[in-house]
Amino acid sequence: MDPNSDDARKRSALGPVTDHAADGAQSGAPEITLRDISAGLHPSRPSVPAPAPDQVDWLDTFIDELIDGDGPSTFLKPAAGMATNATEFVDLSIGRAAAQVLGQVLLGYSPVIDPVKGVIATRLTVVPVRATATIDVGALLEAVAEVWPAHGDPVMLNLASESLLNDVLRARPSLNVLIEVPAFLAADAANTRALQQLAARGSALLLKGRPLRELPREALSCFKWSIVDRTEDRRDGRIEPPHGVARTIPFIQSGVRTMAELRDSFARGAVAVLGWPLHEPIAQGFEARPDTRVVLDVLRRLDQGHSLESVDHVLMRDPVLARELLQLVDTEASDLSIEARSMRHAVSMLGAARLRRWLAQLLGRSSDDIALRPANFAALRRGLLMRMLAAGTGQREQRGELFMCGVFSLLDRIYARPVGELVHDLAMPERVRAALVDRSGPHRPLLDLARAVESGAPHDIRTASDAVFVQPIEINRALLRSLLVASHLERPAVAPPLAAHEAAAVRAQR
C-alpha cells in the first residue's frame, strides 16, 4: 500500500484508536468504529451513484431530481409558499407526526472534524421550542433518517431535552445515529439497562461531559467515546479529576472555536473535535489555495460531457476557487462591465473550453489543505440554506445571489483579510456586496439566520428568524434539505478524488 494514499494515512492515524475503542464493546454486536466515521461510511453502506449529466443541468434540477427521485421522500420537497404549520405536510409520505415535529424543535448543526480526513460527520443539535412539549421520538428519528438513512453517513444526535433523550435511549435508532448521553444520565442506574441494550445492538454511544462521580462499570462499558469540552479538560493540569474517576475511553473535544484550539485538542490526544474553528482567520501563516479535489472533480465532469451549467454548484464547494473564477471573469470582461449574477452566469460567460484550460493551469498550484475543509463545509451549507429559505421570504428570484452570499461569507476567515478588500474588484451583485461588506441590504438577515442555525443557540435562532418572519418548521425543513443536498454535491462525479501522490503526478505532467 502506498504510504501516501488516503487508506494508508487513515489506517496509521486511526488504527490505535479503533483498537482502544473496541475494548469496551459489547460482544456479538456489529462494530462501528471511528475509522468508519472517518471514511464517512457505515460498514455496510451501499454505494450511491452520482447523478447522470442530464439529471444535473443546474442546481435547481439537481435538487428537484434528488428530492423527487428514489432517495428521500417528498417530505423534503419545497412547498409553493412558506409553511407555517404541519397541515401543509399531511399528504406527504412520512406522515403528519414526522412533519409536525419540525415545528416543535429548533435545529442546529456543526461538523465533526478528524485530524486526517477533515470533516467526517455532522452533529445535529435538537432543542424543543417549549420545554414542556411532548415530542414524538419516532417522528423525530424519521425526520433525521430523511437526511441520514440507515447504512448512510453518520450523524451525532445532541438532544437538549432530558425527556426526549430518555425516549431515544429506549427507541431503536439506526446504527449510523450516534447518541450523546450526558454524564449525569449515564450515572443514573435507571438508564443502565437501556444503554446496555443499545450497545448490544451496535449503537455508538458517546458520554458527554466530565462525570462528577464514578460511573457504574456496566454503564461505562457501553460508551465508545467521551465528549470533553475544552473548558472542562483536565489535561492542562489545572483541573484535577474527582476521586475515583479516570478517563478510560478515547475522547472527542467540544467547544473548539479556532484553528489554534483545534490543533491543541489533537495534541492533547483527541480523536476528533466538535465545533466551528472559524472564530479567527484560518489562513494566517500559509496561502489559501484552491482545493485540489474540487478542481479535479470539475475537470472530470467536463471531460464526461456534463453540461456547463452543471459544474457551477461544484465550484461553489470551494470559496477560494469560486472567488478566483469571478476574478477571471472580471479580468476578461473588464471592458464590458458585466456583473456575474450567479456562479452559473459566471461559468456561462467563460465557456467550457476556456474554463477547462483555466482549471488545468490552476491544478498546478492547488492544494489539499485539511485546514480549509471546515470552512468549505460551512460555506457550501450556509449558501444552500440561504438559497432554500428564499422561497419563504419572498426572495425566490435572488436564489443565485443568496447562494453566492453564503459561500463568500467566510472569505475573511479563509484569507485573513477584510472581506471588503477581497470582493472589491469582483463582478458580483451589489446586494451580495452589501451583505458581506456593509452588513446591510436584503440578503443580510438571511445570512444572520444561517449563522444562528450553525451556532445551535435557541435565542440567536429565534431572534434571527423573527427578523425575516420565518417559522421553525420552515427553517428546519430548509436546513435538512441543505444538509442532504450538500452531502450529494460533495460526492465525486464517478471516480474518487485522486490520492495525494496521484494528484502530484498530474501536476507534474502539466
Image (spheres, rainbow, N blue to C red):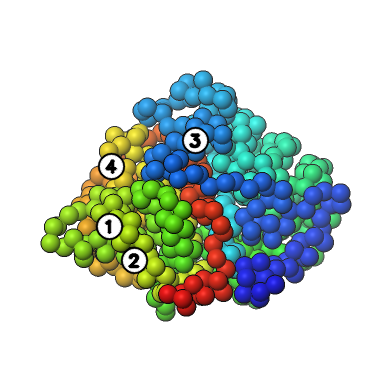
Task: State yes or no: discs 4 and 3 in contact (Cβ < 8 Å).
Answer: no
Residue underneath mark 2: 358
Tell me: residue 203, above or below residue 417: above
Seen from the viewer's position, the closer of residues 505 and 311 is 505
Instruction: Measure the alpha-carbon separation of dots 1 and 3.
Output: 30 Å
Q: Secondary structure at mark 3?
A: helix
In this picture, residue 246 sits left or right of residue 84? right
Could you tell me the amino acid type at mark 4? Gln
Q: What residue is at 36 percent from the left and 28 percent from the top? A: 81
Task: State yes or no: discs 4 and 1 in contact (Cβ < 8 Å).
Answer: no
Eye-nearest disc, 4 or 3: 3
Residue underneath mark 1: 350
Across and down, in percent, residue 229 comes to 60, 62
Which mark, by number, is residue 67? 3
Task: State yes or no: discs 3 and 2 in contact (Cβ < 8 Å).
Answer: no
Eye-nearest disc, 3 or 2: 2
Q: Quadrant of residue 119?
A: bottom right
Label 3 environment density (alpha carbons within 10 Å; few <14, some 14–19, many ≥20): many
Label 1 environment density (alpha carbons within 10 Å; few <14, some 14–19, many ≥20): some
Q: Is residue 403 visible?
A: no
Across and down, in percent, residue 230 comes to 58, 65
Task: State yes or no: discs 2 and 1 in contact (Cβ < 8 Å).
Answer: yes
Which mark, by number, is residue 398? 4
Eye-nearest disc, 2 or 4: 2
Eye-nearest disc, 4 or 1: 1
Q: What residue is at 82 percent from the left and 61 percent from the top? A: 23
Could you tell me the amino acid type at mark 2? Trp
